[in-house]
Image (spheres, grey):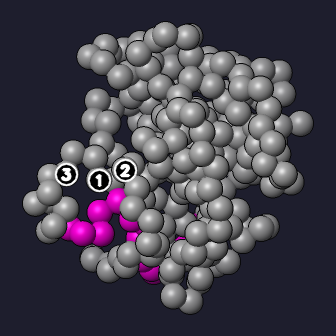
Amino acid sequence: MTYAAIPASADVHALGEGPVWDPVRGRLLWVDIVAGVLHEGVLDPGTGLVTATGRHAFGSTVAAVAVAGDGRLIVAEKETLTRVDLDGRRTEPARVLPDGVRSRLNDGAVDPAGRFLVGSLAQDDRGGEEVLVRLDRTGLTHLDTDLTLSNGLAWIGERLYSVDTGAPHTSSVAFAGPDLDLLVITTSTLGLTEADLAAHPDSGRLFTCRPGVRGLPTPYWNPF
């Protein structure tokens, strides 16, 4: 079965990723990893269009974001985790990866207990040295230390599923909207030639579609 997806935003991203729906505040969050920008927007559930409402620029790659119940954010930068308060102020970053390692943080998500998990990927030809870590009130815990590219975190009950892949050019999806019936799709322009972009001019934009099913709510990050 095929579903039609429509371009949902005007912004073009080098590597759009990690959409997160915040139902309490009715906002959509996503990142452009390469540009190092965290985006915020409002999703129109009727049209499926996204209107940008804010952006947070960081001095490095930004791979993932999670939302706390009170609206604060945890952001995975290149090697560190940064908390963003409601007024936009940022805490001193907590280091996850050693300084100088040719790696960066990648996909992150909140587990059913409210803990934030994030993994890393190699930026060279190394393999089997990347990590998956968990942040909770006690600090950082390493869950895996022999990955190649940590990606695709998901839970069913108490079971964690984590994808380890050697293909870095991946994007992401998330269900959003008041009824969780809109699928938000992030895309990338990385590696596309001028001819590719001419043939696919909406590359790098957000898309939405209605697949006819509803998603599950995303747990809020619990930093307390």
Residue sitting at x 54%, y 75%: 50
Determine the secondary structure under disc 1. Answer: loop
Task: Please tell me whether residue 46 is drawn above or below residue 133 in the rendered image.
Answer: below
- Categorize mark 1 by other alpha carbons within 10 Å: few (<14), some (14-19), many (20+): many
Badge 2 or badge 1: first in the primary sequence: 2
Is residue 217 on the magenta stretch?
A: no
Give the side of residue 177 with respect to residue 6, left or right: right
Q: Amino acid at mark 2?
A: Ala
Residue 180 appears anywhere in the view: no
Residue 14: numbered disc = 2
Q: Amino acid at mark 1?
A: Thr
Q: CA distance from mark 2 to mark 3?
A: 10 Å
The reply to whether the C-beta atoms of the residues labelled 2 and 1 are less than 8 Å apart is yes
Residue sitting at x 53%, y 28%: 78
Q: Nearer the viewer, residue 13 or 129?
A: 13
Q: Amino acid at mark 3?
A: Leu
Residue 15 position in % (x across, y down): 39, 49
Determine the secondary structure under disc 2. Answer: loop
Is residue 214 on the magenta stretch?
A: yes
For the C terminus, the image quarter is top right
Bounds of the magenta segment: 200-215
Residue 111 position in % (x across, y down): 67, 42
Give the side of residue 150 with respect to residue 217, left or right: left
Q: Which residue is mark 3?
A: 192
Q: Residue furthest right?
A: 224
Residue 28 position in % (x across, y down): 62, 64
Residue 199 appears anywhere in the view: yes
Badge 2 or badge 3: first in the primary sequence: 2
The reply to whether the C-beta atoms of the residues labelled 3 and 1 are less than 8 Å apart is yes
Q: Which residue is mark 1?
A: 189
Q: Residue furthest left?
A: 195
